[in-house]
Image (tube, grey):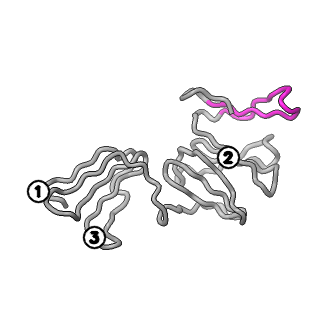
Amino acid sequence: LVHDDWVPAYVYTSRNQGTSWTLVKDTSIYFNVFAVDPYDANTIYGSSYEHWVSRDGGKHWDTLNTVQTVHCDHWCTRWDADGALYDCNDGGVWRQRKGEKTWQNMNRTICAFEYYDMHNAQRDTVHIMTGAQDNTGQYRFSTDREGWKHGIFHGDAMMCAVDHDNPD
């Protein structure tokens, strides 16, 4: 993978131990990950805005439309011992079990947010609002376990505030 900041990234392959290289794919962005299936060396997954898979050692690539389900800033892809594929991205961690086509959001059991801001009501200890990079915001409206409302707005939530006179 060759890239420089925000300019397009290019994937090259070599079949002669690096003597010569062939362009395989223009990925168009800098956040790319590649992982070779530990159970099948010809299966390679790659990610940028979406996921791709090659089942012939990188000669041909198919796009797996994951943009609608998995966050598009991919940083790491790994397999577990059972053959499940994990994707770590700005939206947290997602899993695709071997043989399945859908991704499972693993973020209900872990905290995987990069918070930019948090604001609380000045007149009580209950109402708190957070803003996370790329990953919406959360709002606490009660102290019980289910007291957090997630996904109150999307994208970069960043800065947030709670009205001091009306925390609702």
- Mark 3 or mark 2, which has the lower sequence index? 2
Locate residue 121, reporting x and y percent.
19, 57
Judging by the rendered image, the residue that carries numbered circle 3 is 143
Q: Residue at x 47, y 65 (%)?
A: 108
- Mark 1 or mark 2, which has the lower sequence index? 2
Locate residue 50, reporting x and y percent.
60, 46
Calculate the distance from the C-alpha at mark 3 to the C-alpha at mark 2: 43 Å
Most foreground residue, 53 or 80:
80
Most foreground residue, 110 or 135:
110
Count of numbered marks:
3
User: What's under tag 1, amino acid-wise?
Assistant: Asp
Calculate the distance from the C-alpha at mark 1 to the C-alpha at mark 3: 19 Å
Label 3 neighbourhood size at 10 Å, few (<14), some (14-19), many (20+)?
Answer: few
Quadrant placement of the N terminus: top right
- Mark 1 or mark 3, which has the lower sequence index? 3
Q: Which residues are magenta?
A: 9-26
Q: Are marks 3 and 2 in contact (CB under 8 Å)?
A: no
Most foreground residue, 91 or 117:
117
Q: Magenta stretch: residue 63 in it?
A: no
Front position among marks 3 and 2: 3
SS class, disc 3? loop
Judging by the rendered image, the residue that carries numbered circle 1 is 165
Q: Magenta stretch: residue 18 in it?
A: yes
Judging by the rendered image, the residue that carries numbered circle 2 is 52
